[in-house]
Each structure stands twice: as C-alpha cells, then as structure tokens.
Amino acid sequence: MSKIKFSIEKPGEVTLEIFNLIGLKIDELPAGHLEVGDHTVFWKPKYNLSGSVLNYRIELNKQVIKENMFIVR
C-alpha cells in the first residue's frame, strides 16, 4: 500500500490519477470533497508493481499537482 500526502489551500472536489512512465492511466481515485489542510490518501495497486516508478496527478479546482512515486516491496 502506498501513502500519498498533499496539502490544499481551498476546499473542493479532489481527483487523484496514477500513471505509468509512458503515460497510461492505471488507476483513478476520487478522493471526494476535501477541506483546507494536509491530507493523506492510501492506494493499493491492483497489480504487482514492485520496483516501478509511477506518476500521480491530483486535480482540485482546476489546480493540478504532479509528482513521481516509487513502488518498493
């Protein structure tokens, strides 16, 4: 299970998408309506992705945050 932490400055609907390195979306997590502050989303891959580098994209009120994550076993 992976832990994704982020902060938001304005409340709103949040969507979290996870992509592989070639840009193929492998999962989407609707986090729902979140308030201002620090948040943590837990994600469990549907497949064995050990040793993978993935990208995630968080969208909130037309603001986009993009980051990388490493899956280790």
Image: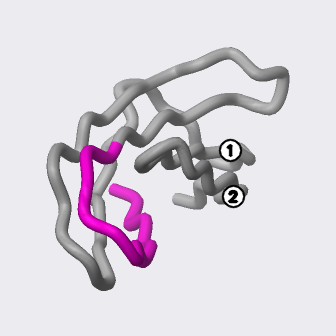
Which residue sits at x=40%, y=59%?
2
In the image, farthest residue toward the top:
24
Quadrant in which the N terminus is drawn: bottom left
Left or right of residue 23: residue 58: left
When the figure is inspected, residue 45 is found, relative to residue 34, above or below; the finding is: above
When the figure is inspected, residue 5 is found, relative to residue 23, above or below; the finding is: below
Mark 2 sits on what residue? 67
Which residue sits at x=59%, y=45%?
56
Q: Is residue 61 magenta?
A: no
Left or right of residue 11: residue 19: right
Q: Which is the main secondary structure of the residues drawn in magenta? A: strand
When the figure is inspected, residue 49 is found, relative to residue 24, above or below; the finding is: below
Residue 57 sits in quarter: top right
Residue 41 sits in quarter: bottom left
Are the two marked residues, 2 and 1, in contact with CB atoms closer than 8 angstroms?
A: yes
Label 1 environment density (alpha carbons within 10 Å; few <14, some 14–19, many ≥20) = some
Residue 33 placement (x, y as % from top left)? 15, 51
Left or right of residue 50: residue 67: right
Which kind of residue does numbered mark 1 sit on? Asn
Q: Which residues are magenta?
A: 1-14
Say whether disc 2 or disc 1 marks the residue closer to the N-terminus: 1
Left or right of residue 20: residue 58: left
Q: Nearer the viewer, residue 8 or 50?
A: 8
Which kind of residue does numbered mark 2 sit on? Glu
Residue 55, labelled with which disc?
1
Does dot 1 land on a helix, a strand or a loop? strand
Does dot 2 land on a helix, a strand or a loop? strand
